[in-house]
Image: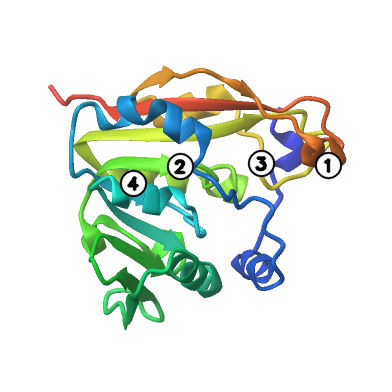
Amino acid sequence: MLAPQADRVMALGEWEERWQEGRITFHQPDVHKMLESNIDKVLSGRTGVRFFFPLCGKAVDMKWLADMGHSVVGVEISEKAIKQFFEENNMTYSEEPVAAIPGAKVYKSSEGNISLYQCDLFNFSSAIEGQFGAIWDRGSLVAINPRDREKYAALIISLMAKDCRYLLDTLLYNPELYKGPPFLVPDEQVKSLFGNSCDMEMLQPQDALGDRQRAWGLDYLTENVHLLTPKSKV
């Protein structure tokens, strides 16, 4: 099932180029419906939750959560995306180097409730910002190179606090018709990546086939959302 995409590689530079050139059709101008409709499940009655956004881009979801009283830490390779996030939301921010990650910078909102790290996701770790009570993975697992998925899952699991609720958005389509990204992530692979460490609940799938995806040549596109929680260690 994965064979057509197994060796597909997007260099970090290609993602940066997409931002530079404004080829960011993956950016959504509104809060993601899958986050909005499942937010109660993610919060599970908690307030002031720390959210982690892998490959955050300039997702408006981050401001939406911060305005609700939560805090957000994101990682993004494109400096342009991070600056646009703060500028488009009229937020003042500071910029400083990250001692633990050579070449990285962190951009922090003046309120201190949003910190966005400009670096390679795989250079980030719990040593930098601890663990998180929630993770929203909208376009991250589907964007990283398929061969990096095990490394990615290990990183995400290491960032999960005991009470973490990880909302993971994946896409199903025929990989013979489109080479990605976003890449196909079958449910069986979600199980093999996270099943040993996490309990998994499949939330409502959604038909996500629009004109843009038809233009890629796809005949169906299903968006699946999984809620993963760390298994309690006996």
For this view, does 217 lie left or right of residue 157? right
- Displayed quadrant of residue 6: top right
- Displayed quadrant of residue 128: bottom left
- Tell me which amino acid carries mark 1: Trp
Give the alpha-carbon distance from disc 3 to disc 4, as whole Å: 27 Å
Give the label on residue 183, or none.
3
Residue 84 shows in this picture? yes
- Tell me which amino acid carries mark 3: Phe
Say which residue appears at 32% left-offset and 57% top-offset. Answer: 73
Name the residue that disc number 1 marks. 216
Give the alpha-carbon distance from disc 3 to disc 2, as whole Å: 14 Å
Give the label on residue 137, or none.
2
For this view, does 7 lie left or right of residue 162? right
- Tell me which amino acid carries mark 4: Leu
Say which residue appears at 39% left-offset and 65% top-offset. Answer: 123
- Identify the element where label 4 is drawn: helix
